[in-house]
Image (spheres, rainbow, N blue to C red):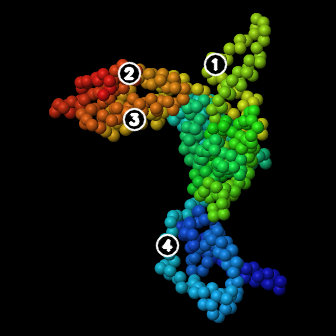
Amino acid sequence: MDDHRDDKYEETELEKSGSGTEDKKGDDSGSDYEDVCFICRRPESKAGKMFRLPNHICVCDDCMHKTMDTVSQFDYQGLLNNPNMGDFNGKGFPNISFVNLADLKGDGGIPNKQKPKKKKKAAAEIDIRDIMPPHKIKQKLDEYVVGQEHAKKVMSVAVYNHYKRVATGTMDEIEIEKSNMLMIGPTGCGKTYLVKTLAKLLDVPLAIADATSLTEAGYIGDDIESVVSKLLAAADNDVERAERGIIFIDEIDKIAKKKNTNSRDVSGESVQQGMLKLLEGAEVEVPVGANSKNAMVPLATVNTRNILFICGGAFPDLDEIIKQRLNRKTSIGYSAELKDKYDKEKNILSRVTVEDIRKFGMIPEFIGRLPVIFTLEGLSREMMVQILKEPRNAILKQYQKLLELDEVELLFDEGALEAIADKAMEKETGARALRAIIEEFMLDIMYEVPKDDNIGRVTITREYIEGNGGPIIDIRSRSAEHPDRLNVIQQPANGS
C-alpha cells in the first residue's frame, strides 16, 4: 500500500515538473535540431537545459527562474480571485488578460518556429590507438617549423603522454599527473607558432591568452578564469570538448614578482597563486558567451583536470641570472674559469634551472605545476634562410602564390635570401623581422606588376636587397611562334 502511494506521489511530482515524460519524449523523437527558448530565443547549445512545456514550448533555465521570481513578487492568488480585473485595488492588475497556451497550437502560433542549427553530437571518447605517436607529431611539426629539434621532441612526447592520460584515466589504479609545459625562448623564435601548429595537427580547441592582462580578482583587467572562458568559446561552448583542449598562456614572464616595490602587486605574484588551481585541476565556473560574470550571463562548470596548459615567455635578463650562477664556479689559479667565458655563448638559456626561474620571480608552487621545462634556441642566419623558403607556408611561397594569381613567376636568388637574413639578424626580433623586410622590398613590385600584363617573371637579387640595383624583370615574348617564351629585356637600376 505504501509503495503504491509512493509511486503515485512520484508520478504526480513528475507531471508537475513539466520535464519528465516530455523530456523523454523529446529525446526519443530523433530530432536533429536544437530547441529554442520561447522567451529569449537562445538555442539549447547556448542557453543550457530546457524546460519543455505543453504544445512544444521550450523555456530555458534562466528565463524560467526569472519568470518565477517575477511572479512570486505579486499576490497572484488574489489576482485570480478578484472578479473585477479592471479595478486595481491591490488584488488585481488593470487591463491585463492571460494568454491561453492552448491557443498557440500549430506552427503559426509560435513565433520563429524554425530552429537555428542541428544538435552537436556528443564528444566521442578518445581511443588510445588513434593518438598520433611522438615521432609522427614531430614529423608534422617539421613541415611547418624550422629547427628547434629539442623543443619539438619535448612537446611531441608531452602531448602524447597527456592524451594517453586523458584516454585511459587511470592505468592500473595509478593516476598519471598532468604534463603542463613551460617554454622559454627569445622573441620571434616560434613559441606561439609551435603551439598553433600543434593544436591544428591534433584538431583540439586552442585558447591563446596573454598573461599581461590578467589581474587579481576584483581589479580592472581579466580574471584568471577568463583563460578557461576563451577555451570554452573556442570549443563552441561544448564543455566536454573544451575539457580536452589546450590553453597557451603567452608572456608568462610578465607575472613575475615585482622586486623592490611597496605597492600592491595585483598582476604579479597574486596571479601566479590564482593560477595554481587551474594548472593542477579544478572545477571552474566560467561565463558562457561573455568575458565577465554577471547576473544576465549563464555559467558553465569546466573541469581543468584534463586541459593541457602550455606557458611561454621570453624571460628577458634571465641569461644574466644564469651567467651569475655559472660564474660562481670561477676560482683563482691556473684552472680558474674566466668570468667572460659565457658572455659569447648564444644558447645560454639552454642551461636554465628551476633555481634561475625562481630567482627571476616565479614562485616555487607555480614552477612545480609546470614539470616539463624546455628552451628554444635563438635563430641563426642559416635558420633564417630556411624559414624563408622551406616551411609549407613559407613567406616566399606566400608571395609566389600572390603573383601567380597575376600569372607572374617570382624567383629569389640565394644571395637575396642571405641578404634578407642578414638584415633580419640586425633587428634582433627573430623571424618577425623577415616579414617586415620582405614587405618593404616587395611593395613596389606588388604595385607595378598588375599595371603591365607583359611582365612574366620577376627575380629578386642581392643587389636589389642591398640597394645597389634592382630586380630582373622578364617580359613575355610577343612572337606568334613562341607566345609563352620569356626574354630578359631590362634590368632597372632602382627597382622601378
Cα separation between marks 3 and 1: 36 Å
Query: Residue 467 bears which disc, if any?
Result: 2
User: Is 39 placed above or below 118 here?
Assistant: below
The residue tagged with tag 2: helix, strand or loop?
loop
Residue type indicated by callout 1: Glu
Mark 4 vs mark 2, CA separation in Å: 65 Å
For the residues marked 2 and 3, what is the alpha-carbon distance in whole angstroms?
21 Å
Q: Earlier in the sequence, mark 4 or mark 1?
A: 4
Residue identifier under label 3? 399
Binning the other alpha carbons within 10 Å of mark 2 as few (below 14), some (14 to 19) or many (20 upward) gives few
Left or right of residue 489, residue 357 in this image: right
Pick the front one: 81 or 345: 81
Name which residue lies at 69% across and 33% down. Answer: 373
Dot 4 or dot 2: first in sequence order is 4
Q: Residue at x 57, y 84 (%)?
A: 99
Question: Which residue ends up furthest to the bottom in the rendered image?
Answer: 83
Check disc 1 and report the residue beneath it: 345
Decide which of tag 3 and tag 1 comes sooner along the chain.
1
> Residue 113: percent from the left, percent from the top?
50, 73
Of the residues shown, which amino acid type is indicated by label 4?
A: Asn
Q: Position of residue 485 (x, y in %)?
A: 23, 29
Contact, mark 4 vs mark 2 (Cβ under 8 Å): no
Residue found at the very far right of the displayed protein:
2
The mark closer to the camera, 4 or 2, is: 2
The answer to whether one can see residue 221 in this image is: yes
Which residue does the image show at 60% across and 65% down from the upper left?
A: 47
